[in-house]
Image: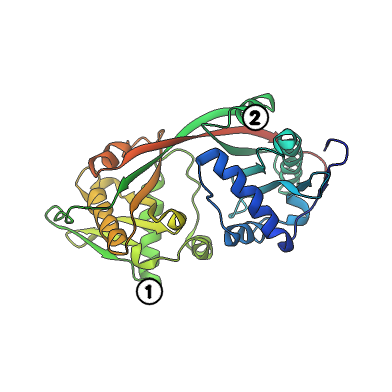
Amino acid sequence: MTLPAGWTARRPTLDDVPAILAVVHAADTFAVGHPDFDAEDVEAALTAPFFDPARDSWLVEDPDGRVVGWTVIDNPTGVGREFVEVYVDPERGAGVRAALLARVLDRIGERATERGLPALTARTTVFAPETRWAAQLVEAGFTRVKRYVRMTRPLAGLPAEPPPPPGVTVRPVRADDEADLRLFHRIFDTAFRDTPDYEPLDFDNWREQLPRYAKVWDEWFVAEVDGEPAGALQSSDQALDQDTGWVRTLSVLPAYRRRGVGAALLWRAFTVYAAKGRTAAGLGVDLTNPTSPATLYRSVGLREERWTDMYERSVPAVGV
């Protein structure tokens, strides 16, 4: 990694969480207008499965010893694509972002070798203000593959939850009942099998990941049609700092689509969020999803707020 004179790179530790968080907050504020990470998120990234901060991450310090850049590789399942983040302080660290990207790509090549693969796919995101970052990614061999849209709606004055269609019922998931969690996973897994890029995860591995985002169990729901499982909605706390309830995934089994199941799940989530005093509800939608969920989301009052582009490239295996 080539850095300007007086700048240094080193591996992060948990002692660096406050300094890393400052960089991430600066980067997020530039990209999306507000901080979108907290200290717990940084700690989770540094202790995630299939990630070793002593090998898979870098910090960059400027000549004053201030941390201005951080890289992280996210692959919680240890299979499939590698998601990379290169955070920099937009005022002090923008000039080292390309160098950090090059180093993390070298490491992904090493990880491909360690997994016995000829190559790995690396992905990262670009927000609208990050025009320089988009250009750097293209120069590094990335191409844009899809666009996500963040959609939100206010919850102030939310109308009463409409009655679900005949035969449709919505209930909270029973988090202390493994059979119900297995049912939830089966609905989620089956519903997403026909969407682009879905990487299946068996129940045991899925269950292990739940502590990362399953902190609001009373905001997870199962829908049934005439007593048969039909859909599921899982929330996360990722937008609580914005006083927003967040729909992490909405799953409707193919046989029950276009029958009001998805809308019933969303209305139940909105009602619960509002009862807790949240001011807004939100979710992200992949515009390449063949089920065209944006149409459903608009029908329940969600509107586009901003977009995020996904870039990717193949990284060949290299010697370790």
Q: How is the image coloured?
A: rainbow
Nearest to N terminus: mark 2 or mark 1: 2
Pick out the residue farthest to the bottom. 176
The residue pinned by badge 1 equals 177
Q: Nearer the viewer, mark 2 or mark 1?
A: 2
How many labels sit on residues?
Answer: 2
**Residue closest to the eye, 292 or 89:** 89
Query: Which residue occupies 15% across, 54% down?
Result: 162
Q: Position of residue 103 (x, y in %)?
A: 76, 39
Vertical side of 152 occupied by 142: above or below: above
Q: Position of residue 148 (x, y in %)?
A: 45, 37
Q: Which mark is residue 137?
A: 2
Q: Is residue 155 left or right of residue 71?
A: left
Q: Secondary structure at mark 2?
A: helix
Q: Position of residue 174 (x, y in %)?
A: 34, 71
Type of the residue with mark 2: Leu
Q: Is residue 194 left or right of residue 157?
A: right
Q: Position of residue 225 (x, y in %)?
A: 19, 57
Type of the residue with mark 1: Asp
**Disc 2 + disc 1, Cβ < 8 Å:** no
**Residue closest to the eye, 227 or 82:** 82
**Residue closest to the eye, 235 or 279:** 279
Q: Residues within 10 Å of mark 1 (few under 14, many from 20)?
A: few
Pick out the residue farthest to the right. 5
Q: Is residue 286 left or right of residue 141?
A: left
Vertical side of 96 occupied by 279: above or below: below
Vertical side of 173 occupied by 52: above or below: above
Query: Which residue occupies 70% across, 55% down?
Result: 19
Query: Which residue occupies 34% across, 51% down?
Result: 281
Quadrant of the rendered image containing residue 186: bottom left
